[in-house]
Amino acid sequence: MNLVIKNIGWLVQYHENPIVTISGSDMKTIPLLQDAWLFCKGGNFQSWGPMSKFNAELKVLDPAGTAKIIDAAGGMVLPSWCDSHTHIVFAAPREQEFVDRIHGLTYEEIASKGGGILNSAARLAETPEEQLYEDAAARIREMIAFGTGAIEIKSGYGLSFDAELKMLRVIKKLKSSFQLPIKATFLGAHALPLAYKQNRASYIQLLTDEMLPAIAEEGLADYCDVFCDRGFFTPAETETILEAGWKYGLQPKIHANELDFSGGIQVGVKHRALSVDHLEFTGEEEIALLKDSGTMPTLLPSTAFFLRLHYAPARKMIDAGLPIALATDFNPGSSPSGNMPFVIALSCIYMGMDPSEAINAATINSAYAMGVEKTNGTITAGRKASFFITKPVASISSIPYNFGSNLIDRVFLNGQEI
């Protein structure tokens, strides 16, 4: 079925020619067309233009008059957000740790007492696969309502052969159940299980020699991730795991430099990571390595917000010519939210990003950071017609400005209203 959106207040992020990333000062530029219409065919974007030419163009595009016509009533139309870093398959929230942090414990102190990731792993081991699926599916539906149209999901709350594969099988089922792209990332190296505390090498061997072959055999993962940071996995251990992942065609996506200058960015770039994520600790050396590397720096400001960390130096990175992507890090311990508009607001308020930069980071660049840049992230002819219509607003700045309001009115995936 053909779909037409008319009376669009602002058509945002439309491109006549395909674009896959945007960097540096160019991130402040975003295409805007006022008083516009949009035509979608076969689940893809096809064409657009000003309302002054709408009637004439529609006769050509839809001569039979069969297209479904929706009136945006002055609302903006934007391509769906791409959330390139989440952990939404988990068994239970961690409210008690939230209270513990209020009372003065740090994230690392909680983890050292068996909380944090290990707490989630213990809960997940006891939870049936079907329950994990139902809970994660509910989170995806909530994320779609926030305007998200592509999601990456990591394992990493299993930390055993059976539980990691259980998580990845849940993600595989989610892929087949929803109309949006879902990417699966193997993150067995999320934390060191207590049983291996005195024998790190054996756990890494379990990851490389047993888990990865089984994951590859079932086709359960698209990427391989490691938490390369202080108190978790070293650069040398990370290299071992990433090299093993590449043998099975799994490109790296790295947790790096959240807690310290860990060397995670360096090892990520060296091993051609698609993205390096978190990056609260990023200096001149790291910026120089990332420049023209093909690795997307991905910032997760809601994690810094929730854990009261200092924020990644987004302004410094963009001014140095880097691209930036944004994602939610939706997880039970450090960012229990899939609200991309709020992430955009945080990036503007606390990281000094211009609203245009933030929207580019949450669409074009975040699509690249999860490998869907050829199908999602922009309004371009031939790409998936996944987008949302906002309530009538003055400008794109309304999204971060109204951080406590839900401005999204209608959501479409592949040309179908959700």
Image (cartoon, rainbow, N blue to C red):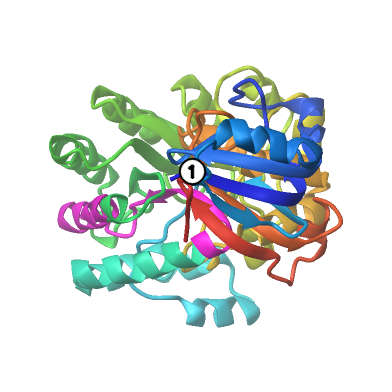
Q: Quadrant of residue 173?
A: bottom left
Furthest toward the right, the residue is 394
Q: Visible in this render: residue 176?
A: yes
Rendered residue at 82%/27% (across/down): 25
Rendered residue at 43%/75% (across/down): 93
Q: Position of residue 111 (x, y in %)?
A: 45, 65
Q: Position of residue 312 (x, y in %)?
A: 71, 46
Rendered residue at 69%/49% (across/down): 6
Q: Position of residue 103 (x, y in %)?
A: 63, 82
Q: Quadrant of residue 56?
A: top right
Q: Which residues are magenta?
A: 144-173
Please state which amino acid type lies under the numbered disc 1. Answer: Asn
Rendered residue at 46%/22% (across/down): 272
Left or right, 135 with respect to 218, comes to right
Q: Position of residue 295 (x, y in %)?
A: 55, 26
Quadrant location of the N terminus? top left
Q: Find out whether residue 14 is within the magenta segment.
A: no
- Tag 1 residue: 2
Which of the pair 278/167 is nearer the observer?
A: 167
Rendered position, 142 above or below 239: below
